[in-house]
């Protein structure tokens, strides 16, 4: 059994909760006791052998880990490098999100919480949260923007079938940002008995670090699997899509301090980075504070948060996790922005070449491959974060 | 830049008055962009002790629906920090009205617009237009002390901190030691406008805080919406803060001075 605790270095979170100048816990006093309780306990809690045993047991027997590392031969031939796909799409519930919700439900139980609140955009995190709540018999409330409820109806039905209450977030643009606001408000109103399961590496410290640790199972497995398949632990590139950035954080985690491994983060350009309809946070954003952390976010000159746009509900977020903001600013990560059309094309491409229909979020990561100037002896791992079943109604418009 | 700062109006107020203080919140640029100073003057004429002006923000996580909607409306009206400071620029002077604003003014809002404006520029503007204090709920005390306290002090701007029923005694002592002006006591575990009435457990919390004999006076906010709740809060603290109820009043009745006078009279009775 492996521990998911890693030594502290420059791309790890500081004691005060920062990655470089990003991170921290910018929260109203009403949330301070909850966040502080979590901060004081999360490291010891997840290092505890009992926790580790239960976490790994659930990852294996419930979520279906380890997920395969698949050599995509035809895609490799097309892009002119060796491309492996880390098959997070094969996780129970259809995406990497379950890694985090399993970890956090165990934390919530140990904190004695009776109720779970969560936000969701595309519905994948909502489904993953509803799933672990059903498993553990905890009450579950999921906030989802009214617009997203309309466009992701199958996931709404899944959550309800799993026993969760889906509450529409009707403020603002009625998407992920607003669902997050509503979940935070719910937590303020219910501070004692409720745990908030944030779905990405965003939010106040310790959330970004805690979620990254739970998702770090992705790169832990990549290292072992790549060693068996290629004789080396380190690829030349790890590529992942970034909305808030949880699958990227997990895929990068064990490579953060391996300078020979380039970390490639792919954001959603929507209709084009400068079109006014985009979610390319690092290209368009400036440092600011959103949902409890200092990060890079899309905002007006006056500091009002801008409504993002992407064809994929999972990348439709105006901010980015503070770890990623630090990777961007420090130059440790390479950031690309992929348009809706290029993402859709990459989704169709993978479906036909490899027999795998990816989530549209994931398709953004695949679309970056031709832009990376890959060399024939390069080894690339793409985090195939989710499956495309939920996106069929969108894909079908392009058939 | 002046180094000789005049006394702060908030500190002055509490030096002279310690009972039944009424602080009223409203959102800048609501219901209409140019209503800010009208409402401010209306509140002063109605005899409120402090005025808290909301700096509208797109994502006010500590606020309930009423204040959220007033924030959205103000932003749609075109309100920004720049515009707000322009509106406030002349209010402390005699001006056309011959009616200078003398009531202590607090700005309440979220940290991001302030960061984009620039913290030092913000404090300088506050000083210039006569803002006495600031409430930034998503700027926790430790971050304020580490990064911004010196700047606030340099310009004589008070940073008002919140406590809640869940705040530990140790932390309350720490907040009290690091605060000037007053402490904003959030009445219950809630967002603004979410509660009605004052429960027994809230009374117990008010009593617990009163018994701590803090060096700063306290004003109780959240859920204070009428005469009864104002009276109860004033039994335990130096006074109270009315927000959502006044926003609802403005929404229904507009910014007329007479309406504001009646609203304040009803709360104070």
Image (spheres, rainbow, N blue to C red):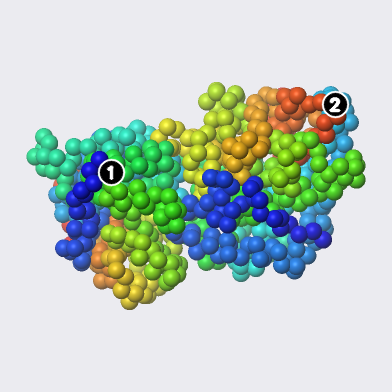
Give the secondary structure at mark 2.
Answer: loop
Q: Estimate the x, y position of residue B63 in percent, counting from the top left.
A: 41, 51
- Front position in the image: A326 or A315: A326
- Residue drawn at the location 36% of the way across and 58% of the way down: B161
Give the secondary structure at mark 1.
Answer: helix
Q: Quadrant of residue A365?
A: top right
Q: Residues within 10 Å of mark 2 (few under 14, many from 20)?
A: few
Quote the CA–CA distance across marks 1 and 2.
60 Å
Q: Which dot marks residue B126?
A: 1
- Front position in the image: B255 or B3: B3
In the picture, the quarter occupied by the N terminus of chain B is top left
* Subunit under mark 2: A
Q: Estimate the x, y position of residue A333 in percent, counting from the top left.
A: 66, 36
Q: Are marks 1 and 2 on the same chain?
A: no
Q: A111 left or right of B130? A: right
A309 over A166 or under it: above or below: above
Q: A376 left or right of A21? A: right
Residue at the disc numbered 2:
A376
Does any portion of residue A144 appear in the rendered image? Answer: no
Q: Estimate the x, y position of residue A218 in percent, counting from the top left.
A: 76, 48
- Front position in the image: A49 or A157: A49
In the picture, the quarter occupied by the C terminus of chain B is bottom left
- Residue drawn at the location 28% of the way across and 43% of the way down: B126
């Amino acid at each position: 059994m492996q521990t998911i605790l890693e030594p502290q270095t420059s791309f790890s979170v500081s004691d005060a909760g920062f990655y470089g100048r990003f991170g921290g816990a910018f929260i109203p006093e009403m949330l301070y006791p909850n966040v502080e309780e979590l901060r004081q306990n999360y490291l010891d809690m997840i290092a505890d052998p009992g926790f580790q045993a239960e976490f790994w047991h659930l990852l294996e027997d419930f979520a279906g880990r380890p997920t395969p590392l698949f050599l995509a031969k035809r895609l490799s031939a097309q892009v002119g490098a060796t491309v492996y796909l880390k098959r997070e799409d094969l996780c129970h519930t259809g995406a990497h999100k379950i890694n985090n919700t399993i970890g956090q439900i165990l934390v919530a139980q140990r904190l004695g919480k009776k109720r779970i609140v969560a936000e969701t955009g595309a519905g994948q995190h909502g489904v993953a949260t509803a799933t672990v709540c059903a498993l553990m018999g905890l009450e579950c409330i999921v906030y989802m923007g009214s617009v997203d409820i309309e466009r992701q109806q199958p996931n709404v039905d899944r959550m309800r079938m799993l026993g969760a209450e889906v509450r529409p977030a009707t403020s603002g643009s009625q998407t992920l940002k607003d669902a997050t606001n509503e979940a935070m408000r719910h937590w303020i109103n219910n501070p004692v008995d409720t745990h908030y399961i944030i779905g990405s590496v965003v939010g106040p410290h310790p959330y970004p670090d805690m979620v990254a640790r739970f998702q770090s199972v992705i790169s832990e497995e990549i290292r072992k699997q790549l060693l068996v398949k290629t004789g080396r632990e380190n690829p030349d590139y790890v590529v992942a899509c970034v909305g808030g950035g949880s699958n990227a954080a997990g895929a990068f985690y064990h490579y953060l301090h391996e300078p020979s491994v380039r970390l490639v983060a792919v954001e959603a350009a929507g209709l084009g980075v400068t079109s006014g309809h985009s979610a390319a946070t690092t290209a368009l954003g400036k440092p600011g504070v959103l949902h409890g952390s200092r990060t890079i976010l899309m905002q007006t000159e006056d500091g009002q948060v801008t409504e993002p746009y992407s064809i994929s509900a999972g990348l439709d977020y105006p901010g980015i996790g503070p770890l990623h903001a630090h990777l961007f600013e420090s130059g440790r990560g390479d950031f690309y922005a992929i348009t809706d059309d290029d993402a859709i094309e990459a989704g169709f491409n993978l479906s036909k070449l490899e027999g795998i229909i990816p989530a549209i979020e994931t398709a953004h990561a695949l679309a970056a491959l031709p832009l990376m100037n890959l060399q024939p002896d390069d080894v690339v791992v793409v985090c195939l974060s989710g499956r495309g079943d939920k996106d069929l109604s969108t894909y079908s418009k392009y058939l | 830049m002046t180094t000789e700062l005049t006394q702060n109006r908030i500190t002055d107020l509490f030096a002279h008055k310690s009972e039944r203080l009424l602080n009223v919140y409203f959102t800048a640029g609501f219901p209409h962009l140019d209503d800010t100073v009208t409402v401010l003057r209306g509140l002063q004429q109605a005899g409120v002790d402090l005025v808290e002006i909301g700096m509208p923000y797109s994502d006010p996580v500590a606020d309930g629906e009423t204040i959220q909607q007033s924030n959205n409306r103000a932003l749609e009206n075109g309100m920004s920090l720049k515009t707000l400071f322009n509106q406030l620029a002349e209010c402390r002077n005699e001006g056309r009205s011959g009616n200078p604003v003398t009531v202590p003014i607090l700005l309440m809002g979220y940290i991001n617009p302030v960061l984009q404006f620039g913290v030092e520029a913000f404090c300088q503007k506050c000083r210039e237009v006569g803002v006495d204090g600031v409430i930034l709920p998503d700027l926790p005390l430790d971050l304020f002390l580490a990064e911004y306290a010196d700047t606030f002090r340099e310009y004589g701007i008070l940073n008002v901190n919140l406590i809640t029923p869940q705040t530990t005694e140790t932390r309350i002592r720490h907040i009290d030691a690091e605060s000037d002006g007053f402490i904003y006591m959030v009445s219950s575990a809630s967002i603004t406008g979410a509660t009605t009435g004052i429960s027994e457990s809230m009374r117990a919390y008010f009593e617990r805080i009163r018994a701590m004999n803090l060096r700063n006076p306290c004003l109780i906010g959240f859920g204070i919406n009428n005469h009864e709740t104002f009276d109860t809060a004033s039994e335990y603290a130096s006074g109270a803060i009315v927000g959502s109820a006044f926003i609802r009043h403005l929404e229904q009745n507009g910014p007329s001075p007479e309406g504001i006078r009646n609203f304040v009279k009803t709360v104070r009775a």
